[in-house]
Image (tube, rainbow, N blue to C red):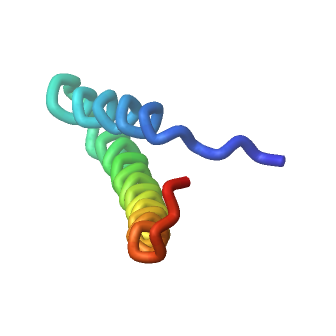
């Protein structure tokens, strides 16, 4: 089974890509490859954040229901 990308690792990798694009004198082809990697990372990060937001919303809703029902768990 493939290892799921870690959010923090993806952010660190994106920072490295940005640093490469800003500081290195890359030829056009290498710059495009870095840019493509960066776009893919941004998409993965966005999907991860959306998933986490959904989970947090579910947890919040469950807690609110428990509070309304008088459960202290």
Q: Where in the figure is residue 28, as x and y percent of width and height?
A: 27, 44
Q: Is residue 36 left or right of residue 3?
A: left
Locate residue 19: give its quadrant.
top left
Q: In the rendered image of this protein, does residue 71 appear above or below residue 65?
A: above
Instruction: Tally the numbered discs.
Output: 0
Q: Where in the figure is residue 69, as x and y percent of width and height?
A: 47, 75
Quadrant where the C terminus is found in the figure: bottom right
Q: Nearer the viewer, residue 20 or 42?
A: 42
Q: Is residue 62 left or right of residue 68?
A: right
Q: Where in the figure is residue 33, as x and y percent of width and height?
A: 40, 46
Q: Nearer the viewer, residue 57 or 6?
A: 57
Residue ranking furthest to the right: 1
Q: Is residue 21 visible?
A: yes
Residue shown at the point (35%, 54%) measured from the top left: 42
Locate residue 52: give its quadrant.
bottom left
Q: Where in the figure is residue 59, as x and y percent of width and height?
A: 47, 63
Residue ranking furthest to the front: 70
Residue shown at the point (46%, 69%) measured from the top left: 70
Residue shown at the point (42%, 60%) measured from the top left: 56
Q: In the rendered image of this protein, does residue 25 appear above or below residue 55?
A: above
Q: Is residue 47 visible?
A: no
Residue shown at the point (37%, 29%) measured from the top left: 12
Q: Nearer the viewer, residue 56 or 49?
A: 56
């Amino acid at each position: 089974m493939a290892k799921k990308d870690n959010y923090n690792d993806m952010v660190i990798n994106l920072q490295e890509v940005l640093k490469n694009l800003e500081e290195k004198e890359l030829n056009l082809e290498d710059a495009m490859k870095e840019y493509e990697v960066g776009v893919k990372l941004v998409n993965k990060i966005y999907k991860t954040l959306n998933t986490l937001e959904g989970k947090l919303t579910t947890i919040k809703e469950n807690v609110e229901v428990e509070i309304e029902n008088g459960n202290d768990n």
